Image: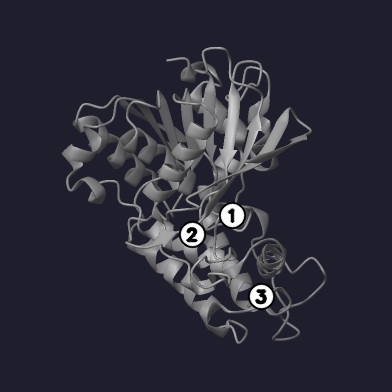
């Protein structure tokens, strides 16, 4: 394990395990060795019972202050005067944890598209091993949005004695539309002339494919209302006129292209394929064979948060999941963010998330 001191009361480190024996995966594959990149804000108290685990969304990282800085305020959910906050980078990502760019012990080459299927339970099991290495047995709270919320729910099911409260935002098993969108995104990446069966180099990556995939994803992260309010039928802000030339864009086209260009510079195509497949396979009931077997395991308080304009994880699906969890004896409540930002609301309007959760008070259960 290595760690370096960083600003913002932060320690960044990397925990490596499974060096002698592979880390078995639910899919039947294995990873060897495994590294989990983590960020720790503040220190555990003497009783080591003030730790909050924050789980990132699809393209996030262990550095929670990069994407949820507003929640670190005094009195907030991640108040460092009260809590020690830990973020981890998930398996399959490209920000330091073991993923497609990592070297396979079997071949001596990067996994690339041969990186095995990783489930949410696999990710949570790796996080548990990291926490063990840090001497942390109990979690005050596990919180995350989207795929991060999936992790929070699996913490409540897979480790019922370790988490006191789990908060999942914009989280439910993907419906057919969500599965379809993920499928199309993976296909456009594979159709890129530079895909090369996943064996590409940094300077010849399938940039066009991942740019288009990101643009498709952006449509599912926002809402029609927000797009109409911000872009409507405005001309692209660089002066292009769609009535003058067939290649000229409306403002929404310029926005999407810009989002795709930014994403290409910061994310890996094989990681994108891996993580979207992990999202697809989230099914909290499947592992335990029945809803009763899965949800009756839960001892933590569970809070599910829906987003009014979210059409990737519709609020009615999140509410139904909360009802199913509560049906089998778990303490589970449902809350809803009223926002036009769609699925992205938990990142775009964190103040509304804090409001529906009652700032930091709700986690003192």
* Quadrant where the image shows the N terminus: top right
* Residue denoted by label 3: 207
Name the N-terminal-most of marks 3 and 2.
3
Mark number for residue 147? none
Viewer-closest of 217 and 286: 286
Q: Are marks 1 and 2 in contact (CB under 8 Å)?
A: yes
Against 197, residue 350 (above or below) is above
Against 321, residue 266 (above or below) is below
Please report the residue visible at 55 percent of the width from the left and 65 percent of the height from the top.
100
Q: x, y percentage for residue 11?
A: 70, 34
Task: Determine the CA span between mark 3 and mark 1.
Answer: 16 Å
Extreme residue in the right direction: 239
Quarter assignment of residue 245:
bottom right
Against 111, residue 12 (above or below) is above
SS assignment at label 3: helix
Extreme residue in the top direction: 46
SS assignment at label 1: loop
Q: Nearer the viewer, mark 3 or mark 2?
A: 2
Report crowding for label 3: few under 14, some 14 to 19, many 20 or more residues within 10 A (C-alpha).
Answer: many
SS assignment at label 2: helix
Q: Is residue 247 left or right of residue 163?
A: right
Please report the residue visible at 24 percent of the width from the left and 35 percent of the height from the top.
295
Name the N-terminal-most of marks 3 and 1.
1
* Residue denoted by label 1: 59
Q: Is residue 28 left or right of residue 33?
A: left
* Residue denoted by label 2: 275
Q: Are marks 3 and 2 in contact (CB under 8 Å)?
A: no
Q: x, y percentage for residue 307?
A: 46, 42
Please report the residue visible at 17 percent of the width from the left and 38 percent of the height from the top.
292
Q: Is residue 283 left or right of residue 274?
A: left
């Amino acid at each position: 394990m290595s760690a370096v001191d960083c600003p913002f009361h932060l320690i960044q480190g990397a925990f490596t395990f499974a060096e002698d024996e592979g880390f078995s995966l639910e899919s039947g594959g294995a990873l060897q060795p495994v590294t989990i990149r983590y960020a720790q804000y503040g220190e555990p108290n003497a009783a080591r019972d003030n730790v909050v685990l924050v789980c990132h969304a699809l393209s996030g990282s262990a550095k929670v202050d990069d994407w949820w800085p507003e929640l670190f305020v005094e009195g907030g959910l991640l108040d460092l005067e009260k809590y020690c906050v830990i973020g981890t980078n998930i398996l399959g990502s490209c920000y330091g944890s073991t993923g497609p760019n990592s070297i396979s012990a079997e071949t001596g080459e990067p996994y690339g598209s041969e990186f095995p299927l990783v489930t949410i339970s696999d990710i949570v099991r790796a996080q548990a091993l990291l926490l063990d290495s840090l001497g942390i047995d109990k979690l005050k709270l596990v919180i995350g949005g989207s795929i991060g919320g999936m992790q929070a729910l699996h913490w409540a099911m897979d480790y019922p004695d370790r988490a006191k409260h789990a908060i999942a935002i914009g989280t439910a098993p993907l419906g057919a539309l969500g599965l379809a969108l993920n499928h199309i995104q993976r296909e456009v990446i594979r159709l890129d002339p530079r895909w090369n069966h996943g064996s590409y180099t940094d300077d010849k990556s399938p940039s066009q494919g991942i740019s288009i995939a990101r643009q498709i994803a952006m449509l599912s992260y926002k809402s029609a209302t927000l797009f109409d309010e911000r872009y409507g039928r405005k001309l692209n802000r660089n002066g292009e006129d769609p009535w003058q030339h067939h290649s000229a864009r409306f403002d929404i086209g310029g926005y999407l292209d810009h989002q795709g260009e930014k994403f290409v510079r910061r994310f890996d195509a094989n990681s994108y394929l891996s993580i979207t497949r992990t999202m697809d396979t989230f099914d909290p009931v499947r592992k335990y064979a029945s809803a009763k077997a899965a949800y009756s395991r839960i001892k933590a308080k569970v809070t599910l948060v829906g987003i009014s304009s979210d059409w990737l994880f519709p609020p009615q699906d999140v509410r139904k999941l909360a009802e199913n969890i509560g049906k089998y004896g778990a303490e589970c409540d449902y809350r809803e963010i009223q926002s036009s930002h769609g699925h992205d609301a938990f990142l775009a309007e964190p103040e509304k998330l804090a409001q529906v959760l009652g700032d930091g008070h709700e986690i003192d259960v």
